[in-house]
Image: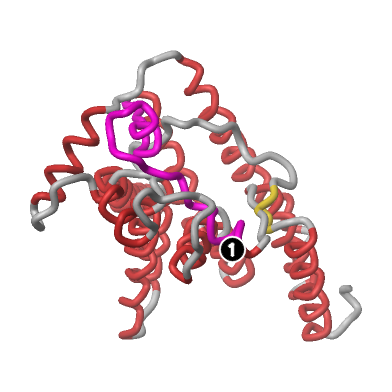
Amino acid sequence: MRSLPRPVAVAAYAVVLLVWCAVVGIPNDPIGIALWLWLFAVCWRGERSLDFPRDWWPWLLALAVYGLARGLVDDLGWPPHVAWPIRADTWLAQLWGGHTVPTVSLQRELCGDPCSKTGTVRWWDVAASTVYASHFVVGLVLAGVLWLRSREAWRMWMRRYVVLSYVALVGYVVFPMAPPWWAAREGLLPHVARISGRGFHALGIERTTMVFGGLANKTAAMPSLHTGTACLVALWALTRLRSPWRWLVLAYPVAMAATLVYSGEHYLVDTLAGALVAALTMVGCSWWERRQAGTLVSRP
């Protein structure tokens, strides 16, 4: 494909990717997504594409180790916190006159009472599934764009992206927490359905792991990495873009938080913690980079 004109190569790439997503499923794991990004790099700028594996493999290895460690944390046997997030979310709901956790209220209003995975699917269910699935793609696609445009900006972004994952991992170790659907299953909340994939399921859209997507951990809830990543993307855009329209990117983490709470995947307090961790990651990485730059300048 390197010998083809760029528009033809990119168009062919788009067709192949769409067919793959329709037949196999949307790539859902970091290595699988990176392989598609590498293929795009071949189509876009073939002469630089051989640098892709050399540049990306350390970061992908770090993400694979994170995915493995996240699952192993679930085997430590520490009991998850179940009651505390219910109290926290109930208190937050009372700030605007609510009487129960926001997940229960949203599902009753928008999904049904009781909410069901097989119930009527509305447009907001499809939107929620789309926003939820974007977590696995957006951060790495942004990395792919940055890799083609600026290696330095790409390294800065990947540093934040990976650091955020490991900071969240620390949270999963020290504070394992049951999500709303778990608490409902144990009888501590009214009925809550886990419906993050309901919209995609109704449309016949699947997400697939091509290589390695990590191990599942049902108590990896505090902080919400979905919200953290969405906030990280928004904060990165706010600090890099100059357009007055850049503030619209804040809609992404808001939509992600609303999706997670509505779908029963996270409490509101989880999403707030995810936003806080993202902000701290941005500040911490920026401080480290300034310190490193100062060290290099001061060397004789």
**Does the magenta portion include 143?**
no
Q: Left or right: where does residue 283 sit relative to residue 37?
A: left
Question: Looking at the image, which residue is at 26% across and 49% down?
Answer: 272
The percent coordinates of residue 294 (x first, y second) are 34, 52
**183 in magenta:** yes
Q: Quadrant of the N terminus?
A: bottom right
Question: Could you say where residue 206 lies in the image, as x and y percent from the top left?
Answer: 67, 55
In percent of the image, x 48 and y 23: which residue is there? Answer: 73
Locate residue 279, reporting x and y percent: 29, 53
Q: Secondary structure at mark 1?
A: helix
The answer to whether residue 2 is left or right of residue 104 is right
Residues in magenta, as a range:
175-202
Residue at the far top in the pictured view: 77
Measuring 74% from the left and 51% from the top, which residue is drawn there? 53
User: At which x and y percent is residue 288?
Assistant: 35, 47
Q: Residue at x 61, y 57 (%)?
A: 201
> Which one is nearer the viewer's eye here, 7 or 178?
178
Main secondary structure of the magenta stretch: loop
Q: Can the viewer see residue 19?
A: yes
Kind of residue at disc 1: Val
